[in-house]
Amino acid sequence: MPRALKGAARRQAKVRWFRLAKGNRGTRRNCWRRVKESVIRAGVYAYRDRRRIKRDYRRLWITRINAAVRMRDMSYSRFVAGLRAANIRLNRKMLSEIAINDPQGFDRIVEQVKSVSGQQTASG
């Protein structure tokens, strides 16, 4: 009895892989082995970089907040500690947006933080 070769199912599976490799150059889009390698590697990079993007944005927000806080004579670490002490629960993304788009609002936040941190140093 002859061996079954999967027929149309094999071709459809390969077509899926080749579709994922579309846009690659040279044998990375034509040659079956190279297509599999490049698609798998692309998936690994995509997985890694989805996490790296989050990390990079957080670094950007921290840099922006640090610059805005230093313009108001305070350090970033003292500012964040003061936020916790003042029970102001804003994340870094929102704080950086406020610092850019609403400087007066950010001034009010910094004043609250300074008043709370001033009370802590006086009592501590």
Image: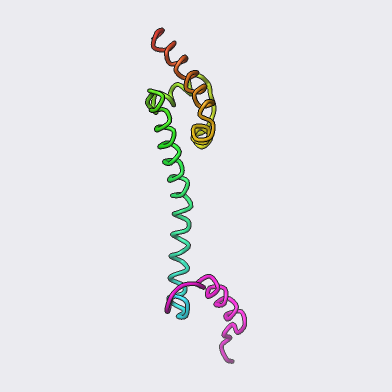
Q: Position of residue 86 (x, y in %)?
A: 50, 19
Q: Is residue 115 above or below residue 17?
A: above
| Residue 36, x across and y down, in percent | 46, 72
Find out whether residue 8 is within the magenta segment: yes
Quarter of the picture containing the N terminus is: bottom right
Instruction: Determine the residue positioned at 44% across, 10% down.
Output: 119
Relative to 62, residue 37 above or below: below
The mark tally for this picture is: 0
The residue depicted at 42 percent of the width and 78 percent of the height is 26
Q: Quadrant of residue 123?
A: top left
Instruction: Look at the image and say whether residue 33 sits in the magenta stretch.
Output: no
Q: Residue furthest right?
A: 8
Query: What residue is at 37 percent from the left and 26 percent from the top?
Result: 75
Give x and y (percent) for residue 91.
52, 33
Task: State the scheme by which the image is colored.
Answer: rainbow
In the figure, is residue 10 to the left or right of 60? right
In the rendered image, the vertical position of residue 13 relative to residue 54, given as above or below: below
38 and 57: which one is in front?
57
Q: Quadrant of residue 118?
A: top left
Q: Nearer the viewer, residue 78 or 108?
A: 108
Foreground residue, 45 or 88? 88
Q: Residue at x 47, y 58 (%)?
A: 46
Q: Residue furthest top?
A: 123
Q: In the image, which residues are magenta?
A: 1-27
Residue 80 appears at what percent x and percent y?
44, 26
Looking at the figure, which quarter contains the C terminus?
Answer: top left
